[in-house]
Image (cartoon, grey):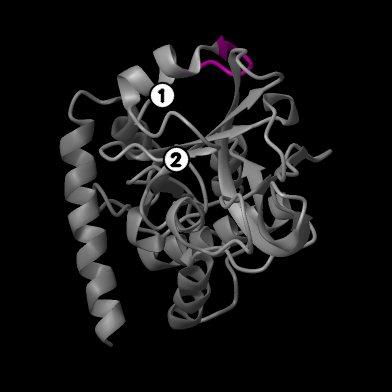
C-alpha cells in the first residue's frame, strides 16, 4: 500500500491518521482493522510513563511494547509487531515531542528482533518489558542489494530454500546489529530465489539478458507482495525476474495482472517444493 506520509513531516494524529485510516486513537500501538499497516507512536515528551524508546546511531529504534502494568506478554499489539512481516503489514513510526502536539512521521520500519528488559511500569514497579528492535526500511538499499552481481552460492537448492524460509520466519531474539541482521536475511532469500529461477525469468520465461563477470545470469529479486516495498522477505512472495519485467511489474499499465500471474507461478513451485 502507498502511504501518503512524508518523512519528517508533522501530522495531527486524530485528523490525519485515525480519521482516514482508523485504528486505536490512544496508546502507542494502533492497528487498523482493514488496512495492511500498524501505527507506532513514540516520544518521551508525550507524557507516557514506563516506556523507554530510543533511536540508535544506525537509525534503528528500540521500541517498548504494549502493557502499562505488570509483565508484558507477546499478545495483541505486541504480537502484531512481531508477526507484521508474515501478515504483510507495514510498521509506520511517528514521534511526538510533547503531549497534545503533532506527530512526526519517521518512516517505515521492520521488526528485526526483540528482547526482554527490566523496566518500571506506570506504577514504578519493576517488570519484564518487551523491547523491539525496529530497523528503518530503505527500499533503495534493499533493491540495490538484490541486484549486486556476485558469485552464486555453492549450495543445493534445498539448502538455500531452508535458509530462505528461516529468514522469512518472525524475528527472534535480538542481534547485535539489527540492520545487519535484516540485510543478511534478505540476502538469504535473494540467493534462493535467484537459484530457483535458474537463469530463466520467472515472469516472461526467457533467459537472463546477460551473464555477469562472475558468471552468474543477471536476474533481479522482485517482491510480489511488497512489505513496505522491501522488508524481511518471504521466498513465497519474491521472484527472480529480468530487469525489463521488473520495471513492468512496478510501472506497467498491466502490473497488477503481471504480479498476480507471477504470484500464482511462485506459489505453485513453492507448494511442490514443500511437499518434496
* Quadrant for the N terminus in the image: top left
- Residue position for label 2: 90
- Residue closest to the eye, 124 or 113: 124
Q: Which x, y percent locates residue 36?
A: 34, 40
Give the mark nearer the N terminus: 1 vs 2. 1
Residue under the image location 23 percent in, 78 percent down: 272
Percent of width and height locating residue 72: 60, 61
Between 234 and 269, the residue placed more toward the observer is 234
Q: Foreground residue, 46 or 254?
A: 46
Q: Is residue 32 above or below residue 130?
A: above
Label 1–label 2 contact, CB within 8 A: yes
Instruction: Locate residue 101 relative to residue 161 in the image: left or right.
Output: right
Q: Secondary structure at mark 2?
A: strand
Q: Which residue is mark 1?
A: 3
- Name the residue at 72% across, 62% down: 127
Query: Main structural element of the magenta stretch: helix, strand or loop?
Result: loop
Q: Which residues are magenta?
A: 5-10
Amino acid at each position: 500500500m502507498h502511504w501518503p506520509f512524508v518523512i519528517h513531516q508533522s501530522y495531527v494524529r486524530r485528523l490525519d491518521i485515525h480519521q482516514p485510516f482508523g485504528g486505536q486513537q490512544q496508546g502507542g500501538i494502533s492497528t487498523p482493522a482493514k488496512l495492511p499497516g500498524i501505527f507506532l507512536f513514540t516520544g518521551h515528551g508525550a507524557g507516557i510513563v514506563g516506556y523507554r524508546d530510543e533511536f540508535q546511531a544506525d537509525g534503528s529504534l528500540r521500541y517498548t511494547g504494549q502493557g502499562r502494568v505488570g509483565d508484558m506478554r507477546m499478545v495483541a499489539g505486541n504480537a502484531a509487531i512481531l508477526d507484521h512481516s508474515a501478515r504483510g503489514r507495514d510498521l509506520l513510526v511517528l514521534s511526538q515531542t510533547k503531549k497534545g502536539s503533532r506527530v512526526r512521521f519517521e518512516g517505515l520500519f521492520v521488526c528485526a528482533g526483540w528482547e526482554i528488559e527490566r523496566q518500571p511500569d506506570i506504577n514504578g514497579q519493576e517488570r519484564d518489558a518487551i523491547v523491539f528492535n525496529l530497523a528503518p526500511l530503505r527500499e533503495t538499499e534493499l533493491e540495490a542489494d538484490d541486484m549486486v552481481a556476485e558469485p552464486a552460492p555453492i549450495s543445493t537448492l534445498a539448502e538455500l530454500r531452508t535458509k530462505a524460509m528461516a529468514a522469512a520466519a518472525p524475528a527472534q531474539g535480538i542481534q547485535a546489529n539489527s540492520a545487519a541482521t535484516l540485510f543478511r536475511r534478505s540476502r538469504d532469500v535473494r540467493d534462493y530465489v535467484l537459484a530457483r529461477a535458474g537463469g530463466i525469468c520467472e515472469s516472461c520465461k526467457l533467459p537472463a539478458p546477460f551473464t555477469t563477470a562472475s558468471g552468474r545470469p543477471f536476474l533481479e529479486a522482485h517482491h510480489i507482495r511488497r512489505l513496505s516495498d522491501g522488508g524481511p522477505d518471504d521466498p513465497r512472495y519474491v521472484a527472480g525476474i529480468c530487469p525489463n519485467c521488473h520495471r513492468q511489474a512496478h510501472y506497467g499499465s498491466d502490473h497488477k495482472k503481471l504480479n498476480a500471474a507471477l504470484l500464482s507461478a511462485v506459489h505453485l513451485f513453492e507448494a511442490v517444493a514443500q511437499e518434496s
